[in-house]
Image: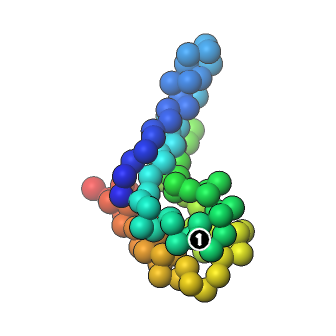
Amino acid sequence: MTVFARIDHAAGATAVGMALRPTEVLLFGNAKGGTPLMQSAQTVGIDLPLKALVWQDASGTTWLSYNDPDWLATRHELGGETEAALGMMTGALAALAKAATTG
């Protein structure tokens, strides 16, 4: 997977004189996984590349949040031909979450 962008919302808040706990969005993916989805329904392009939100709550716990690929399939009414690509995305997101949240 390629990381396309990293958006540091906390730094943006600091730049305008406001406070925000650590909050970052990572945009990542690859054409092999995303293209079949867009071939089925181009509107899914609004949700691609994939995004993950890494954020810290008030108690100092860090969280990793992302949209489930099955939700994307429902939202964009993707056809059955996208099952393999969706499975690949689901597996990649699970691996990312595990790697990011285990020591």
Q: Amino acid at mark 1?
A: Gln
Q: Is residue 7 above or below residue 96?
A: above
Q: Position of residue 41 (x, y in %)?
A: 66, 69
Determine the residue positioned at 72% across, 68% down: 75
Q: Judge by depth and name the residue closer to the eye, 68 or 84.
A: 84
Question: Quick one: quadrant of the N terminus?
Answer: bottom left
Residue found at the far bottom of this picture:
80
Q: Is residue 75 visible?
A: yes
* Picture quadrant where residue 101 is located: bottom left
Q: Is residue 94 visible?
A: no
Q: Judge by depth and name the residue closer to the eye, 85 or 93.
A: 85
SS at mark 1 in the image: helix
Question: Quick one: quadrant of the C terminus?
Answer: bottom left
Q: Is residue 85 above or below residue 28?
A: below
Determine the residue positioned at 41% across, 60% down: 30
Determine the residue positioned at 44% across, 57% down: 29
In the picture, measured across the screen, residue 99 lies left or right of residue 18, that is left
Q: Position of residue 65 (x, y in %)?
A: 54, 55
In the picture, measured across the screen, residue 83 lies left or right of residue 28, that is right
Q: Position of residue 27 (x, y in %)?
A: 48, 48
Q: Which residue is mark 1?
A: 39
Residue found at the far front of this picture:
39
Q: Position of residue 96 (x, y in %)?
A: 38, 61
* Picture quadrant where residue 46 is located: bottom right
Disc 1 residue crowd, few under 14, some 14–19, many 20+, Cα 10 Å: some
Q: Is residue 72 above or below residue 1?
A: below
In the picture, measured across the screen, residue 103 lies left or right of residue 36, that is left
